[in-house]
Amino acid sequence: MAPTAPASEPTPSGSVQLLLRNIDSPGAGRCLPRDATLHVNSRLLSTPHPDAWNLASEVAAASAGGPAGPAASLDGLVGDFLGAACAAPEREYSTSPLGPAAAHVAIFLRSGAPGALGHLYLYSQHEPTRAEAERAIRRFLSLDGTNVEEWTAPVLLELCSSIASGGGGARPQAGHDDPLYADLRRALAALLDIKWKQNPGCWLDVSTEWVAEQLTRLLAAHKANAVMERIASAGVPRDDEDGG
């Protein structure tokens, strides 16, 4: 039985008070006493890019679809998002070295779409779905068929980290042996040239702490894989070689 929880009117700050009743409800499992007052704070962010938020949210939702996988429109959704990001400089002003597209990148990251795409690629048991996820991810590797855009670097980094740290699932070779991961890592390395090192502002809305954390995770995953491969290549000693 669902609890009866009268709610107060939202305040200008977005705070809502909920009065939880019915101690036998699922909420009781969270050690909440009868008539407890819950304070729920919501923060609504205004954005000049509502379409980008909608598309990024659709990508994340489609990537987290049911067992049968998302509809075949996942690749198209990513294409629409990138198309909007590429067109942004034509209609928006930005002081960013990467132009207004950087705001779209930040939205894509905050929506959780890169991680959802990577998870779908790694763990989907449905081959057409996995292939759809790979096509969607590969759109970031070559937007115009020839070059990788600089402003995609934060997304490439998140995708690299997601795939490298996955392991197992439907992609047991996940990591540096995975062809998609290798292509993502190669594209990211090509972007992280001297200009990027000399101009950290290129990461824009993406915090340097996040970049450092992701790079650390990526390097840690590589070291772990290297250690595991070295152990595997050494082999397990036979009983007659073990001195026992």
Image (cartoon, helix red, strand yellow):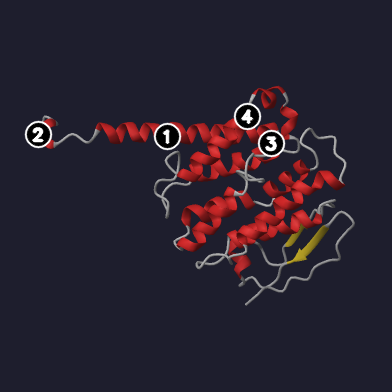
Q: Give the mark nearer the N terminus: 1 vs 2.
A: 1
- Amino acid at dot 1: Ala
Q: Is residue 148 left or right of residue 225?
A: right
Label 2 SS = helix
Q: Is residue 185 left or right of residue 4?
A: left
**Residue 215 placed where, x, y %?**
57, 33
Which quarter of the rendering shows the N terminus?
bottom right
- Amino acid at dot 3: Glu
Mark 1 to mark 2 CA distance (whole Å):
30 Å
Q: Is residue 206 left or right of residue 240?
A: right
Crowd around label 1: few <14 · some 14–19 · many ≥20 (10 Å): few
Which quarter of the rendering shows the C terminus?
top left
Looking at the image, which residue is at 58% across and 36% down?
187
Q: Which mark is residue 192?
A: 4
Q: Nearer the viewer, mark 4 or mark 1?
A: 4
Residue situated in front as seen by the camera: 21 or 167 = 167
**Residue 211 placed where, x, y %?**
64, 34
Q: Give the mark nearer the N terminus: 4 vs 2.
A: 4
Residue situated in front as seen by the camera: 168 or 77 = 77
- Residue 177 appears in which quarter of the rendering? top left
- The residue most toward the right is 12
Residue situated in front as seen by the camera: 114 or 17 = 114
Q: Which mark is residue 184?
A: none
Q: Which mark is residue 240?
A: 2
**Residue 216 placed where, x, y %?**
55, 32
Q: Nearer the viewer, mark 4 or mark 2?
A: 4
Crowd around label 3: few <14 · some 14–19 · many ≥20 (10 Å): some
Mark 4 to mark 3 CA distance (whole Å):
9 Å
Q: Which mark is residue 224?
A: 1
Camera sees residue 116: no
